[in-house]
Structures are given as structure tokens and as C-alpha cells.
Amino acid sequence: MSVTPMTAKQLAQKVIRKEPVFLLDVRNHDSFADWKVEGDNVQSINIPYFDLLDGVEDVMKELPDDREVVVVCAKEGSSIMVADLLAEEGKDVFYLQGGMKAWSEHLEPVKIGDTTQGGEIYQFVRIGKGCLSYMVLSNGEASLIDATRMTDVYIEFAQSKGVQIKHVLDTHLHADHISGGRKIAQQTGASYWLPPKDAEDVPYSYEALEEGKEITTGSTTIRIQPIYSPGHTIGSTSFIVDDAYLLSGDILFIDSIGRPDLAGLAEDWVGDLRETLYSRYKNLSEDLMVLPAHFMIMEEVNEDGSVGRTLGHLLKENHGLNIESEAEFRKKVTGNLPPQPNAYQEIRELNLGKITKNEEEQREMEIGPNRCAIR
Amino acid sequence: MNVTKVLDAKGLACPMPIIRTKKAMADLQSGDILEIHATDKGAKSDLVAWSASGGHELLDSAEENDVFKFWIKKA
């Protein structure tokens, strides 16, 4: 029987289309418990590969015949070995090409909508890690927001659309993933924008993102309007694009809100977070489409694979926007916090330009889910 | 530490470090100590988990010049 590779892109599309898929995850139990492929119609079991070295007869009984079976491991080596063993026993199986590393790195571009004057806005869904980045295109130019380190994807996408990346922006200093912003700006000659309060003492030059400073993409058609919105970090800045989209960074998600502790200052920043969510955001138009920098659970993903809801909807439905008492809010976001993302301090230092890491090291640092939210 | 055998698994990618370790372990007696050298980062958590699942005792581990060293006592 046959063993067929399945790319991260193929698996991502199955997850988004909610096609049934059965995963045999052969990583160790801790890795599986920490982070795995998830989806509405994804069923998975976890049996470490080292428990299958003496034979796979037992696991054969657990594999369904009515859906595709994909063997998954960290990089792919062990999954190929297990897939071969299963094929020898007479089972057609797939393995995830590149393993969870490839899953973590895959970006799926999804069109969010059109802007006025014939522009477009795309969301890049990093489905394995829950990171979201954005490209605003207009009249041959593009602005890129919260880019991941998979810089080729954006550059190739811009080329395929015939646009030149002019501005690269980060809503804040990221702690859960490595920003590709600076690298793309260097490669394309674009300006790199950062909130100055998140970029103190950085050894590189950047344009200061400040409220009131508008950034245009294309022939002055699309306005990117920065809104100072501290809380997740002191410099966190949201953008209103074309008066229609609110890019909320790590401040407001679909089903949760940002956590204030990743720079070690939860107590100091909780007040800012409250102010941003309960005063600043509440003064914005409820028709704005909120486009966050992350999602945490598949329930936050829309039918078409995009992640976004109107601010009006979130003001009603998002629990984090409906905690009346300030004391309760304070308790909720500073106590009982989820574990911090893998290597988050090193990731901050890398994004600040204080340390350098090779590609393999960067991959290792980003292993696991993003964990930027409080539900 | 009284090491019975040293296994060089440097340069090998997953799953080979564990497969070699399992084979080397099979030749040892209960109570013997196997010292393993590996360079694959995934080997660390997998060796810990594999030892636990087989009842072996991970006595110690160290990292020197990008080489991970493990000492496992056979159950």
C-alpha cells in the first residue's frame, strides 16, 4: 500500500474547508499536549513513534477507513517511518511533509475585501500558530502589517499581484513570533514602521508610528490611521484602514483580549488595556471590521478561512469587552494567566535587534501556539 | 559514573537516535548505564519520554558544544 506526502498547504485547506481528516500524531505526549493540529473535523490520536518500533498491528485497528489518515511528527522523519510500517501492513496513508515545523510556517492568503478606489486587503493566516498578518494593496503599491519571518511568501505574493511593498508596519513588539518586518523592508526598500514606545534603544532605524500620522498606499487612496492603543505592550498601536477595517494587533481578538504580561509589566499595563478596550475602542465606529494579529481557537475562524468580525459584534459577544467592574477586569487579566509562549523573552530581544539567531534556531524558538490572549 | 557503553548518535535525525538507543539498550543488562551523544534537538525530549515509557532511568543530561549527552540506566 502507498505512502503519500501531504503538504502543510493541503492540510490547511482541508482544515479550513472542514473536511474530515484523521491524524496519527507520533510525537511524544508532552509535545502533543502542548500544541497540535486542530480543526472542526480533525480527529487525532497520539502514539509516540518510539512505542511503534516493535510493530503497528495494534494501532491499525484504531485507524478509520472512511477518511484520510495522516501521520504527523515534529519534522517528518518519524512520520515517514511510521507511515512505511502502516503501508507494509496494508494501509494507504499520508504523512505531513515537513512535520509540525512546516505546519507552523504555512501561511494561507485569504481575501478580506475590497477597499474604496479599487484596492484590496488580504489576510495571511498562519494556521498552525494562529498568527495573522495583512497586506493592503492599491494602485501598484502595498503596505504589509505584522509580517512573519516567512518573508518570501509576502514578496512573492506582492509580485504576483504586481504591487510594490512600500510600507511595512508592526502593531507592536511581538513576543510570540519573530517579525519579518525589518527583513522585508531591507529587501524591498520599504519603510519599516514601529511604535517608538516599543522600540526604545533599538540598534536599527525605523519610522515612528504615531497617532495622527497617516500612511498612504497607492496614490493617496488608502489611509492607514494609527490609533495609540496600549495594553498588550506600552506602544501597541491599532490601524484603521480605509475607514473600514480595524487592525487591532494583540489588543482585541475575536473571542478574547490581549494579555498585558509578556514584557513583565502586567500590573502597570492593565490600566492601559482597560482604557484602550473600554474607552478608545468604544468610541470607534461599530461597523469597523476587527482584524486581529492572532486567533487562538478554530471557532474564531470564519467559513472562508478568514478571521474577523465587526466591532459591534465583538462589543456584544467578546467576554473581555463585557467585564463591568474594573477590579474584576484587573483580576481577570493579571491573575490566572496562561503559560507564556515558548522563548518569548528571546523572541522580544530578537525583534528588538539585540540578538541574532540563524533560521534553524528561529524555527525552534517559534515552536508551539502563540498564547497572546486571555479568554 | 560507571558507563557501560557509549552510543554516538551525532548527526542523526529523528527517529534514528531513538532507534539506535533502543538497539544499544537491548544489548545491555539491567542496571547498566548507556551514555548517548546526539545533536538532534528533538532527541532530548524524546529520550526523556522514551526512557519513562520503558521504565529506564534518565540519570543525567548535559550540553557541550551543541552535543547533547544523556546517561540512561537500564530498567
Image (tube, grey):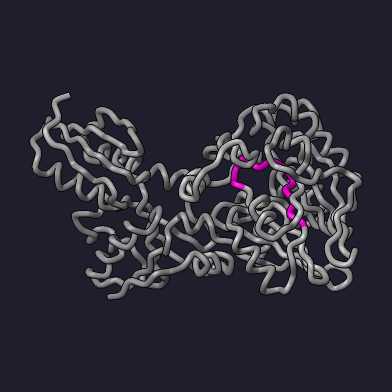
Q: Is residue A322 above or below residue A97?
A: above
Count of numbered labels shown in the rendering: 0
Q: Is residue A145 above or below residue A262?
A: below
Quarter of the image where the N terminus of chain A is located: bottom left
Q: Quadrant of residue A280?
A: top right
- Of residue A280 and residue A213, the one placed in the foreground of this image is A213
For residue B21, say whether it is visible: yes
Q: Quadrant of residue A289?
A: bottom right
For residue A231, say whether it is visible: no
Is the stretch drawn in magenta largely helix, strand or loop? loop
> Measured from the top left, where is residue A34 in percent x and y?
47, 43
Whether the magenta-drawn stretch holds residue A301 is answered as no
Quarter of the image where the C terminus of chain A is located: top right
> Measured from the top left, where is residue A332 in percent x and y?
69, 31
Whether the magenta-drawn stretch holds residue A174 is answered as yes
**Left or right: A369 in relation to A4:** right
At x 17%, y 24%, the residue is: B1
At x 36%, y 67%, the residue is: A64
**Left or right: A21 in relation to A157:** left
At x 37%, y 50%, the residue is: A27
> Measured from the top left, where is residue A301 in percent x and y?
65, 59
> Measured from the top left, where is residue B71 in percent x and y?
23, 32
Per the rendered image, the range of residues in magenta is A167-178
Q: Quadrant of residue A22?
A: bottom left
**Left or right: A285 in relation to A350:** right
At x 8%, y 36%, the residue is: B29
**Left or right: A205 in relation to A344:** right
